[in-house]
Amino acid sequence: MLRFCTICLLLVTCVVSAQRVDSLRHETRNDIYEELASKDASGGMIFLEEGEYIYDLEKRRIKVNKEHKVFNGYRIQIFSGSSFDYSIDRVTAIKNEFREAFPDISAYLNYFDPDFKIRVGNFKNRLDCIPTLKQLRRKYPGCYPVRTDISFEEINKK
């Protein structure tokens, strides 16, 4: 039962931390077990008794996250055009027009040979991008969510 509660606690922590992506700021945390064992503002402490394999699994997850520095998320693609039809200046102008219309949403210009693509936002999952997608469809009716790798550096520079 204690193992089940520990696993549920870890899952709830992941779900709660995955709520809002555009306001997401990546913070490097120390060991979660050290954070829980330290006293909080009210003087309370939490003690977890878990098997060594749970502790090792959490350490491995922290190590992998530090090494990769990217996560699979979603962006909304508002433009795709061939490099034969569009110059880089014209595509950059489209991106700048988007930034003026929506200054609070990050925009990224990518080149996938032979196409230019403008993708916007940083979302952890497809459901998170729905409100922004509805907002963008007024101006960009053909936009749609795209699964992509998002680096923590891109999120933090906003």
Image (cartoon, rainbow, N blue to C red):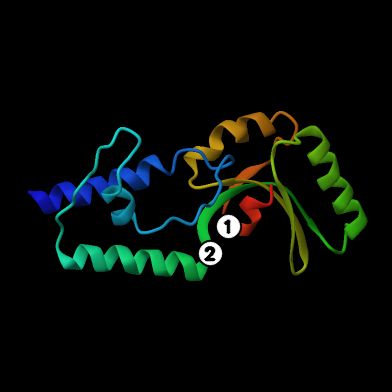
Residue plotted at (54% across, 35% down):
130
Label of residue 152 in the image: 1
Q: Residue furthest front?
A: 43
Inspect the image, locate mark 2, and give the three-letter code of the amino acid beneath it: Lys
Q: Secondary structure at mark 1?
A: helix
Q: Residue furthest left?
A: 1
x and y, in percent, of residue 40 in the image:
33, 39
Give the crowd class for mark 2: few <14, some 14-19, many >=20 residues within 10 Å.
few
Comparing 65 with 78, the one in front is: 65
Q: Compared with residue 72, is residue 68 higher up or lower down, i.e. above or below?
A: below
Q: Secondary structure at mark 2?
A: loop
Q: Compared with residue 38, is residue 28 higher up or lower down, i.e. above or below?
A: below
Residue 137, located in which quarter of the rendered image?
A: top right
Check disc 2 and report the residue beneath it.
69
Q: Earlier in the sequence, mark 1 or mark 2?
A: 2
In the image, taking residue 97 as reference, residue 121 lies left or right, namely left
Whether the residues at callouts 1 and 2 have beta carbons within 8 Å, the answer is: yes
Distance from Cα at disc 1 to Cα at disc 2: 6 Å
Residue plotted at (73% across, 36% down):
140
Comparing 119 with 68, the one in front is: 68
Inspect the image, locate mark 1, and give the three-letter code of the amino acid beneath it: Phe
Residue plotted at (87% across, 64% down):
84
